[in-house]
Image: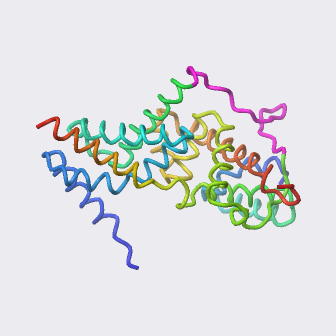
Amino acid sequence: MAEIPQVALARDESHLIGEAKAGNYAAFEELVNRYEKKIYRLGMNITGNREDAEDVLQEAFLKAFEHLPDFREDSRFYTWVVRIAVNEALMKLRKRRSSREVPMETSEDENGEVLVREFADWKPNPEQQFAQVELERILQSAANALPPGFRTVFYLRDVEGLSTEETAEVLDLTVGAVKARLFRARLRLREELSKIFKRGSIQ
Amino acid sequence: MKCNQAIKELSGYLDGELDPELKQTLEAHLTYCNHCHAVFDSTKKTIELYCDGKLFSLPDDVRTRLHEALKRKLHGRR
């Protein structure tokens, strides 16, 4: 299948935004259709439950609609909606957990370097050993072992495919902080999942 | 290259940000160090698992409620 050229897609999106700003609801709905799946997944990934994810999804698009006149097209529409959704999701977590940001649990040596505690090899294709629902539960419980600020960086960079700079912009972090968090988040998630997926582990 | 140095370059390697010389040294380390190879490999797999598009798909009823809420908002404005 031929790929839609990015330039054409961007021009088309800019047209849709213009139409939506002028009050064309169908144009706004088309923008929602493009990104609703991703925003829902983002909500699931950050908040860890369906109810909150649905709230995040609705709030993000309702606010985007409301504030559309303020949207300046110096960033992508998607990044703008992601920023709104991330704020909604983190606010939910703060309410639920009374603003407690637990420190990242990693082992470090005397130089402050991250130590890897688990070197075991994984079984091949671990995803094929679990039903979809079970796999979702495993991934979510591993992610919950990370402080929200770390798993959010992981989702934006590795799952949603935002660049380091875009992630920094969305989360109001420096590029260096995004990289440091991503490194620790990746290692920690791997360590959590290793408990289940490593060779020789008992199911 | 020592294992702790290799681990430090993990993110840069996965993101394709290492300069060619460092990348080559690292890859040489990974060919003979089973431990680091396992860590790099399973970290890559970790990312792939979370990226699986089938996960956390948007349920139809949730989508319907979103579009209804948007329509209500629009009509409230008129």
Image x and y of residue A106, in percent: 76, 36
Quadrant of residue B44 within the rendered picture: bottom right
What secondary structure is the magenta-colored segment mainly?
Answer: loop
Pick out the residue farthest to the top.
Answer: A98
Horizontal side of A63 relative to A134 (left or right) equals left
Q: Residue at x 71, y 58 (%)?
A: B22
Magenta span contains residue A106? yes
Q: Residue at x 40, y 43 (%)?
A: A57
Image x and y of residue A158, in percent: 56, 52
- Camera-nearest residue between A46 and A5: A46
Q: Which residues are magenta?
A: A97-117
Image x and y of residue A163, in percent: 49, 50
Relative to A167, say whether A101 is above or below. Answer: above
Magenta span contains residue A10? no
Query: Where, quadrant-wise, is the N terminus of chain A in this rendering?
Result: bottom left
Pick out the residue farthest to the front.
Answer: B61
Quadrant of residue A182 within the rendered picture: top right
Horizontal side of B5 relative to A9 (left or right) equals right
